[in-house]
Amino acid sequence: MRWKIVDRLARAVTGISSVALVLLVVFTGWQVWGRYVLNDTPTWTEKAALLLILIVALPMAAVGLRENFHLGIDYINDLLPARAQTILEVINSIILGGFGVAMIFGSWPLVVGTWGRDIPLIGLPQGLQYAPLILTGALIVLFMVERIWFLWRAAPQDPGEGAPKPGGL
């Protein structure tokens, strides 16, 4: 199970990243066309493409953590009993959530410190280059809180719980 609002948020992030990816391809194509066909390189496309890469890659990495389509090795986890698997998954989610918190607090000074300067050639605040780090950190925290919530609610119960003990009344 998942929270519906978080599902919508993940879909929105995927949609925005998809549009940014299409723009990235268009801008890069325009740069190549301008350089090799028109012999007049559009200089703004490189800076815009670098910004778009951050918009595509970072938030989608957070969605990848939520959807478990990131690189992961579950071999040892699969060998463990169900309760140990759940505990290991909770520990993993706490570590990832902590990483998200570190991204937020570590990136905030970068955004604030560079917001007053413009990115050369495109005129946008330089802090926009670091803002996706804050957004990604917040998404990771939210997605890991959601994961821990549902792991806690669906935790496997001890098979002997509630059953009468042998030899007891």
Image (spheres, grey):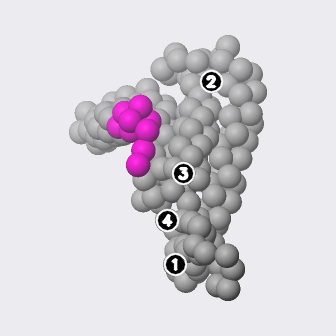
Disc 2 residue type? Gly
**Which residue bears the numbered disc 4?**
71
Q: Is label 3 in a helix, a strand or a loop? A: helix
- On screen, 81 above or below 40? below
Q: Is label 4 in a helix, a strand or a loop? A: loop
Q: Nearer the viewer, residue 20 or 44?
A: 20
Measured in 3D between alpha carbons, the distance from the residue under mark 4 to the one under mark 2, in whole angstroms, is 29 Å
Measured in 3D between alpha carbons, the distance from the residue under mark 4 to the one under mark 1, in whole angstroms, is 16 Å
Disc 1 residue type? Asp
Tell me: 158 left or right of 56. Answer: right
**Which residue bears the numbered disc 3?**
153
Q: Is label 1 in a helix, a strand or a loop? A: helix
Measured in 3D between alpha carbons, the distance from the residue under mark 2 to the one under mark 1, in whole angstroms, is 43 Å
Tell me: 101 left or right of 42. Answer: right
- On screen, 157 above or below 33? below
Disc 3 residue type? Arg
Q: Residue at x 71, y 28 (%)?
A: 108
Q: Quadrant of residue 33?
A: top left
Decide if residue 167 is in sight here.
yes
* For discs 3 and 4, the disc positioned in front in the rendered view: 3
Query: Does the residue at mark 4 contact the one at mark 2 (Cβ under 8 Å)?
Result: no
* Labels 3 and 1: the sequence-earlier one: 1
Query: Does the residue at mark 2 contact the one at mark 1 (Cβ under 8 Å)?
Result: no
Q: Residue at x 51, y 56 (%)?
A: 154
* Labels 4 and 1: the sequence-earlier one: 4
Query: Does the residue at mark 3 contact the one at mark 1 (Cβ under 8 Å)?
Result: no
Span shown in magenta: 1-11
**Which residue bears the numbered disc 2?**
127
